[in-house]
Image (cartoon, rainbow, N blue to C red):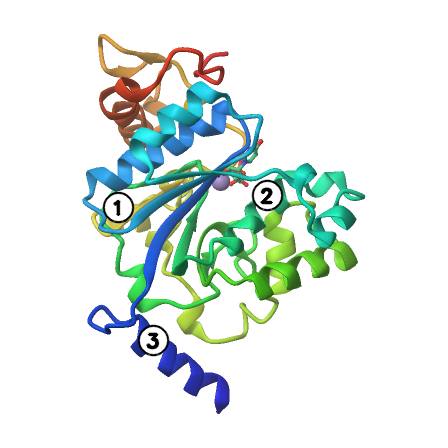
Amino acid sequence: NLEEQVEAIETRLDGPTHPCRGRQAYVTLATNDTYGLGCLVLGESLRRVGTTKELVVMVTRHVSDAMRHSLEKTFDHVKLFDLLDSNDAGNLALLQRPELGVTLTKIHCWTLTEYRRAVFLDADTMVVRNCDELFDQYQEFSAAPDVGWPDCFNSGVFVYKPSLATYRSILAFAVKNGSFDGGDQGLLNMYFSDWARGSIKKHLPFIYNMVASIVYTYQPAFRLNADQVKIIHFLGPVKPWHWQYDIQGRCLMSDTGSLGDAGDLLTLWWNILISRAMPNIEAGVTGLAGE
Ligand code: UDP
Ligand code: MN
């Protein structure tokens, strides 16, 4: 069928050796300094595993200048987005729906059309092994199952194709239909609604969006696959930056015994923050952990 033929052509164009292969980037988002801290660790985690892709962070004006300058040391591009200043008619309509604020900022990732293919990563993710193959092996829209409801994908990690047409189409869809959970995950699951029953090629393996809590909810599976895992997602209300860390002792201050292996992942996040991100953080950042 036509869709499969188009996909085959796209795959060839995006192939690692094709001369027309365009730019590719990992993209993340921060709307404040606290999430900016997450982006710093995510970006450094990608550098640490030797990615060859460009790193882009989308920020809004609530992110301090100091944090933007800090981000510039890790990311190739720090891009400012501001829904309120936009002349885009779709955006104006969306201002009527303030509950979709942060959600819609994430959707801006489709406007990065200088990239042929991109991978969006939440600011609360951490890359522990090189996963650059995502760009060659997956197409829009690929994501991993959500642990709460596996027929929904989790929108913290996804492979997509920047396109203004898609961007406008998602915005128009959002204005009309909203989001069943009020966030980007609900909206994107409604928009890419054939994901659960569509092509399995668009289901990312769980190793690309391993929710940290799985470490204790299904520990044998985690143990079996631990050395395959590539991207950790600290999903949920308690983020790594909410923990207290002993810089001298290089360990978490709270008792992480009950966390088991999840404690090791948290410690790794903090080690990347202290040893790789901290040296880049400029004075004046407002979102430092504990504040
Ligand atoms: N985000 C942000 N500011 C906020 C909330 C969210 O920049 O106040 C961005 C950030 O990139 C974050 C993503 O939106 O990782 C999704 O939110 P979160 O990770 O907190 O949701 P969860 O994965 O826990 O459902
Ligand atoms: Mn997240």
Label 2 beta carbon within 8 A of ligand 1: yes
The residue at the point 42 percent across, 87 percent down is 5
Q: Is residue 212 above or below residue 249?
A: below
Instruction: Answer few, some or many: residues within 10 Å of disc 1's Cα (few below 14, many 20 plus, some between 14 and 19).
Output: few
Label 3: which secondary element? helix
Instruction: Answer few, some or many: residues within 10 Å of disc 2's Cα (few below 14, many 20 plus, some between 14 and 19).
Output: some
The residue at the point 29 percent across, 24 percent down is 277
Q: CA distance from mark 3 to mark 2?
A: 28 Å
Label at residue 11: 3
Q: Is residue 134 above or below residue 8?
A: above
Q: Residue furthest top?
A: 248
Q: On the image, numbered disc 1 is attached to which residue?
A: 223
Q: Is residue 259 left or right of residue 276?
A: right
Label at residue 105: 2
The residue at the point 41 percent across, 47 percent down is 27
Label 1 beta carbon within 8 A of ligand 2: no
